[in-house]
Amino acid sequence: MELVSQHVKGIMEECKLRARDQGLRFDDETLEYIVTNRDIIELSPKVMIPTLYDYWVHDVRVLSGKGMYEAYPSNPYETVINTRPAISYYNDNNPDWLNVMIFYHVLGHIDFFQNNFFYKNTWDVDLTGQALSDKRLIAMLRSEKGRWVDYAIEFARGIDNLVGYQKELNYSIMNGTPRKLDKVDFYFDIFLQKTKNVSPHEYLKEITRFNDTGKKHKYFFDQVTSRYPEFEELYKKQAAIKIKPELDVVEYILRNSPFLKEDENEWIKSVIQIVKNTSLYFQPQIRTKIMNEGWASYWHEYLFMRDDRICGHESDFAKVNAGVTSMPKVGLNPYALGMRLIQHIKDMEDKGCYSFDYYQLKDEMGKKNYDQNKNTGHEFILKVRENFNDFTFINTFIDQKFVDTHHLFVAGKKFNNERMSWEYYIKSKKAVDYKAMIIDTLYHPPEIFVDKARNKDGILYLNHKFENKPLKMDFIENTMVGIEYLWGGPVYLETSEPDSSGKTPINYANFWDPSSSKIEEKKQDPVKWKRMVYMMENRKLSKKEV
């Protein structure tokens, strides 16, 4: 692994100038390295962070990666990581014209990392420096404690998706100051809905009246207080209440575990904190995969097509670009979906389609020909990249026009008994179904919290807020063994399971496989759920119905 040559660095700097002319924003300093396929295989398990702590799972994945490469040789064009300065890696056999395209793609990623608000908790962190410090600490602990360090890492990584990312993000956005209750939020979220319990019709009327007043909030609330004299007093009382944020599971264990409070176990806290901090740093990337790759793909195509260095390589570019951004008939390509959705958003905003008048149209031809010539799409997508993650991006902007334009559909799967094979078929072409299918593939860790009211007799009681998707049953026992070790006592986990009494056993994998048919051809009864408590004590798991 070595730094790129001055010639290649000059190409990168020229790409930066052209990207900035289109409104992309990123730091001046970047680091670019030329790597071999061997380098990439060895760095991939460490998320391309050379200074990340050593762990035996990384070694296993390196061996697996070498085996996969021998069986299926492939050459990734680039990898970029969200560090300060941003670091990117390039394959050692990329020609100059391909590097131009790749540089534009990388700059799209860097712009996204440094401007999307879901990454705000990473903006002031020197990850490579912190990772090196963590690596040295773990190496020192390993020399003193031996294999117990790897047990601590493994148990902490088993719950590293329960690290309170949203709380951390809110803390970063608010610069460490607690958010004050806004009068508007209190009126619409608490006063009308909970105190007065108004009807939906009345609630919508109030929203319309608020929007009609524009920025004249004082005038609006003068009318509110004349109608509800008690409003001001109730607002002041509610605003005076200081709400302490709930601790996430990992933080609660760090602060309250009787086992970790013992002097000889204090070192485990450092290991857990390292695992937690590393997880928090990469949480935004897991939650913005489609947007991030789509944004980078949009800009590498947009900028490279307008770059004179493409001359003579148009067909080469078309072949490479098609391989990256082609839309599969079945399955999901985040590069392709994200890029086309950004193009769709820009086109819709240019025509003024994100307006009340457009959505009021009932005539399909009227919608098809609607064009107000706003031409503000470029500025609009720059705002979108600042404020959305994959869920809000997909949920807000995928509409029927987008689905129809790109001939998208939801595929179903059924078994053909005559041919003894699976057959795929088009189940739906509706935007609402396609959107639901994509959302079902997104990263969504379970919401599990510590139920303090049930923490008795040294028991850590965890409660799973059920969202119609069960926990992965294969993971429960080993994960709870780890939590029991870190807590130093019994651990209970309350969750929901399908009630399959008297029925064919339910295939849990179907709840996690987006390609599986959750709704068979024959109409089935809705799944009934029951609350269960898993109890881990002395490394033995049992369960009972609540």
Image: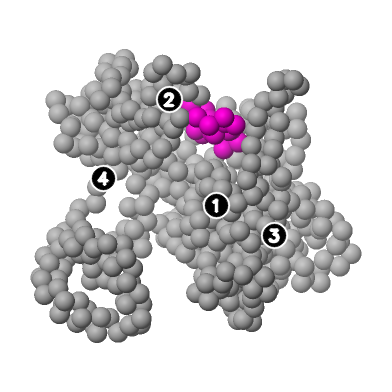
N-terminal label among 4 and 2: 4
Number of numbered callouts drawn: 4
Label 1 to label 4: alpha-carbon separation: 35 Å
Whether 516 is among the magenta residues is yes
N-terminal label among 3 and 1: 3
Could you tell me the amino acid type at mark 1?
A: Val
N-terminal label among 1 and 2: 1
Could you tell me the amino acid type at mark 2?
A: Met
Residue designated by label 4: 247
The mark found on residue 405 in the picture is: 3
Could you tell me the amino acid type at mark 3?
A: Thr
Q: Is residue 39 left or right of residue 141?
A: right
Judged by depth in the image, the label closer to the viewer, 2 or 3, is: 3
Judged by depth in the image, the label closer to the viewer, 4 or 3, is: 3
| Depth check, front residue: 237 or 254 | 237
The mark found on residue 432 in the picture is: 1
Q: Dot 1: within a 10 Å radius of its alpha carbon, few (fewer than 14), some, or many (20 or more) residues?
A: some
Label 2 to label 3: alpha-carbon separation: 40 Å
Residue designated by label 2: 473
| Residue at figure coordinates x 41%, y 21% from the top left | 500
* Residue 437 visible in rendering: yes
| Residue at figure coordinates x 59%, y 54% from the top left | 431
Judged by depth in the image, the label closer to the viewer, 1 or 4, is: 1
N-terminal label among 1 and 4: 4
